[in-house]
Amino acid sequence: MTTPTSPPTPPTRGRRRAPSRMERAAGRAAALQRPRVLLALLLLLALTCVMLLDGYLRAEVGGDQRVRTGASASDVPDDVLDGGPILSFPGGQATTVSVPDKTIVLTFDDGPDPTWTPQVLDILEKYDVPGTFFLVGSMVSRHPGIVRDMVEQGNEVGVHTFTHVDLSYQSQARVTREIEQTQLALAGAAGITSTLFRAPYSSQTDAIDNYSWPVYESLGADGYTSVFIDTDSDDWKRPGVSKIVEWATPEDDEGASVLFHDAGGERSQTIEALPKYIEKMKAKGYTFTTVSGVMADQQSHQPQQSQQQGGGLQAAHHRATGATLYEGKALIAAVAVAEWTVPALSVGLVVVGVAVMGRFAMMLVLARRHHRQRNRRRFSWGPPVTGPVSVIVPAYNEKECIEATLRSLARSTHPVEIIVVDDGSTDGTADIAESLGLPGVRVVRQANAGKPAALNNGVRHARYDIVVMMDGDTVFEPDTVRHLVQPFADPSVGAVAGNAKVGNRRTLIGAWQHIEYVMGFNLDRRMYDLLRCMPTIPGAIGAFRREAVLQAGGMSDDTLAEDTDITIALHRAGWRVVYEEHARAWTEAPGSLGQLWSQRYRWSYGTMQALWKHRRSLTDKGPSGRFGRVGMPLVVLFQVVTPVFAPLIDVFTVYSMLFVDFRAALLAWLAVLGVQLVCAAYAFRLDREKYRYLLMMPLQQLAYRQMMYLVLIHSCVTALTGGRLRWQKLKRTGEVGTPAGTG
């Protein structure tokens, strides 16, 4: 039987068909979405770059230990091995300079440190003593203000690499990068560059070997002066204040390049020993200078203090200009962003981790209680519901699936009338439905107006008080309708959500969605059912009291998630919405990543639209406000906020593997995967599904889940930028035939 509601559009001949209204709208929507996809990807790229920068800054890439020791020094000139602590290459010739007698070059390594370096600077300023600080570039970029104060105070700074790596065993490219990045950090922090260099893990010149010598030669050719030590305070050993002072004191009034540390560990003994040491050396008649001061003294043979006041630069410093200055400032700005972002994300990670684990625990506990409650022998909704119901099948270009759908309904053990609402299909869907000649099937044709309009049209044509809504690509089992309508024996029940199953699960992407449907959707519905705040009746299988649908205003096209919209509306109208696990429907899930993206994008965005539309439910009173008090916060937390920030778990896992502890990070990730496997296995047990699909879950976590994150982030970007979407039609294959063929 056919009930026409509008005349069909006559075909056009002899000319190319003009695009339809929906096709034009879809084209405009696609054009608008491309920038938002790009923005979402750029946000993810920016987060990744920030994390990588932060890890690199913390000097946890490339190692910070010497790789080899005890190498030969046969290639190193003897006058260098036996020479002074200052090594330069004027005219390409290796030359060493010793510190004059009764003179101290006070050097500090590994800074700046926000705790200890300012205290060292205060001491030097108090005693009017200059220091030469060899700075780690990553620390400079994180604490630029300290370096600025250091230079303005008249101290000298030098390069100590960017990540405190032993350059002796690195490639030439790595050596260049370590030096240039540190120079950029100095330029951004204090507007200078420096010609002084000290290698990490270096000591006296007699420790130069065949591996490190080429590094010093190369840097010398570039104009760098390498600085070693005569005397080591060994303050890093924390031997006690008196020992530090003793070990830092040269013998026989000799001059010395003395090493202290203002960073790299707990330096309270250094802070305590430094004033005592300065007082002792001044009492012995020593003067303090910088490396530049020694070089100037050697050139002029006249003792002089190299400390410059009034804003002057040390001889080793050069003002940064041009690209170096601007790139340095950009580096400092990027580091500032990373320094703020990563701690904030760490807090977010804790919150997300607690929320995720809490959700798993809540799902397991409530799902078990739901299963035990609904499967008790004595459980009953009331007298059996045996009256006929109306099944509404909205269809738009479903020629591949419509026959299997209608034949499955014709086998129903519960009396049904079947209303196919053809929404302006152009592939002959309505003709196929009519040609089957199945009893109880009516075909209603309408001009293309969208799924909500098709469902409302079906409700208007329904003869019975209970209406079942399904998709045109879905197959019901013979007992599905009977199970689905039994909760209506309770007069407070206004709608029932069925158990949607993925029928085309033989492919990898289908198997991933199968896991998601069983674990995520159906386990969630058990939890929400018990809490009486079910947020969504799936479009593939849901039953409604016709009275309740009309009271809620029918299916609305205000959002892209008409199923979520009507479900919340029913809650607000005071109706109860429940889940019937035994009412199974087999649906065709998207078969490609592109179609999956489109579907989930629509779902995510539509859910956000529905939540925003019903935001006033938060203030509803009485039973109608239960969704606002319980359901709305849970949906926002578990379906929007937590998934948006859930990528932090994966991002920090990769971050920890690269920069912290690979083994510990891997074990933590496996532990989370184990918890998810337990939840999934329990969900599969409740739904009596085969466990073999869980073998694909680790790969799902590595690939599929990340795609879902991107989809949700894309949806959030669209929502925040005020974008709108239209309902999108997925390409069908007709793979889902009968339930027996899906296993």
Image (spheres, grey):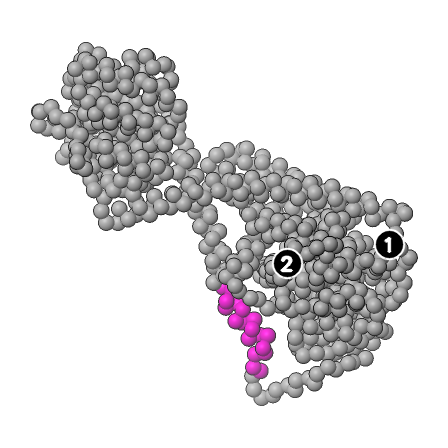
User: Which residue, as the protein is rendered here, is positioned at the far top?
Assistant: 252
The image quadrant that residue 436 belongs to is: bottom right
Above or below for 239 versus 545: above
Which SS class for mark 2? helix
The three-letter code of the residue at mark 1 reads: Trp
Res 462 seen here: yes
In the figure, residue 670 lies in which quadrant?
Answer: top right
Q: Which residue is mark 2?
A: 616
Left or right of 732 in this view: 653: left
Numbered circles on residues, count: 2
User: How many residues crowd around disc 1 within 10 Å: few (fewer than 14), some, or many (20 or more)?
Assistant: some
Q: Residue at x 48, y 55 (%)?
A: 41
x, y (%) of residue 444? 75, 77
Report helix, strand or loop for mark 1.
loop
Residue 742 position within the rendered picture, expressed as x and y whole percent measured from the top left: 75, 57
Q: Quadrant of the C terminus?
A: bottom right
Q: Is residue 24 magenta?
A: yes
Relative to 393, residue 264 above or below: above
Q: Amino acid at mark 2?
A: Arg
Crowd rating for badge 2 (residues with CA inside 10 Å; few <14, some 14–19, many 20+): few
Which residue is depicted at the point 69% across and 75% down?
Answer: 423
Mark 1 = which residue? 381
Which segment is the magenta one? 17-34
Main secondary structure along the magenta-highlighted residues: helix
Give the mark nearest the N terminus, 2 or 1. Answer: 1
Residue 681 makes an appearance in the image: no
Vertical position of residue 394 compared to residue 538: above or below = below
- Is 713 in front, or is 254? 713
Q: Residue at x 72, y 42 (%)?
A: 364
Q: CA distance from mark 2 to mark 1?
A: 31 Å
